[in-house]
Image (cartoon, rainbow, N blue to C red):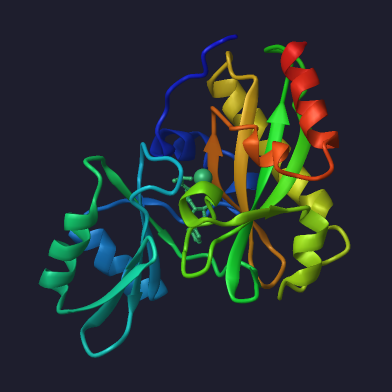
Amino acid sequence: MRKPPNVGKWSKHQHLVKSEFLRDYLPATRQFTPETLWEYVEDYQKVMLKPSGGGGGAGIIQLTDRGENRYLVHAGSAKRIVEGRTKTVEYVKSLFRPKPYLLQPLIPLGKIDGRPFDVRVMVQRTGKNSPWIVTGWVAKLAGPGFVVTNVARSRGKVLPLKTAIRLSNISASEDLEEEISEVALAAANELGKAYPTLRAIGLDMGIDIEGKPWIIEANFRPSLSLFRQLKDQTFYRKIIAMQKH
Ligand SMILES: Nc1ncnc2c1ncn2[C@@H]1O[C@H](COP(=O)(O)OP(=O)(O)O)[C@@H](O)[C@H]1O
Ligand SMILES: [Mg+2]
């Protein structure tokens, strides 16, 4: 099989943000420096720090302004309150993977029983000039105490998308699913132009509590195991069939 290009989150973001349509669905993303971090904390109060070249939820840190110069740092299932900006930067840097880091505002993801979830949308094409098709989607529910929904890392679980939305605190509109697929296809088109050899993209899309979809990241080597874990194997079979094409 064709080897997917190895590209960091920052480069992918640069391609996606070129599209005016997609800009609305992308969390504001910057490269980490101590200065940009404090700008983000002032603007958003809750900030996600993530390695540009990461995967599987590794090295992802949530930072929350607690007031009075205190900051809550949440990484994995561990939480710590740090006092003062200098110590906070030192502490988050000590948690960093040896990679460039990005900043995003924390998207207030929809939750089920207090646990955030997001959606893995599989988009595929059979050739450079063939249309992109949404071949499956599944909700990933974070394990208890985690801010990342990566199923393996957080000991989370998968759920059919409809079930997740129904069980969640999201006020979903009738056409939410249609909007998700429209955004996923637009993202695939943009990335497909930039990377002609690309055949499959696994988009991580969040849905905030107001029912608005967000593009969290685009995976160029999407794992099939999320779809294999669903009781209904329709998506899994469709994905495999597209791959064989
Ligand atoms: N800006 C954000 N707001 C809320 N949750 C986020 C944000 N960025 C990442 N996450 C959570 O962390 C998980 C992992 O982040 P992601 O960008 O997909 O990196 P990875 O490559 O490690 O999977 C996401 O699936 C989501 O649950
Ligand atoms: Mg991811």
150 above or below 54?
A: below
Asked which quadrant contains residue 168, the reply is: bottom right
Q: Quadrant of the C terminus?
A: top right
Q: Quadrant of the N terminus?
A: top right
Left-right relation of 136 to 30: right
Percent coordinates x, y for residue 130 in the rendering:
76, 16
Percent coordinates x, y for residue 100 in the rendering:
26, 42
Residue farthest to the bottom?
68
73 above or below 122?
A: below
Residue at x-position 38% and y-position 47% = 58
Asked which quadrant contains residue 89, the reply is: bottom left
Residue at x-position 14% and y-position 79% = 84
125 above or below 207?
A: above
Residue farthest to the right?
174
Q: Is residue 176 visible?
A: no
Percent coordinates x, y for residue 202 in the rendering:
62, 36
Left-right relation of 2 to 94: right
235 above or below 147?
A: above
Residue at x-position 36% and y-position 41% = 52
Judge by depth and name the residue closer to the eye, 18 or 51: 51
Q: Is residue 101 visible?
A: yes
Asked which quadrant contains residue 198, the reply is: top right
Percent coordinates x, y for residue 225 in the rendering:
63, 36
Left-right relation of 77 to 241: left
Residue at x-position 58% and y-position 32% = 222
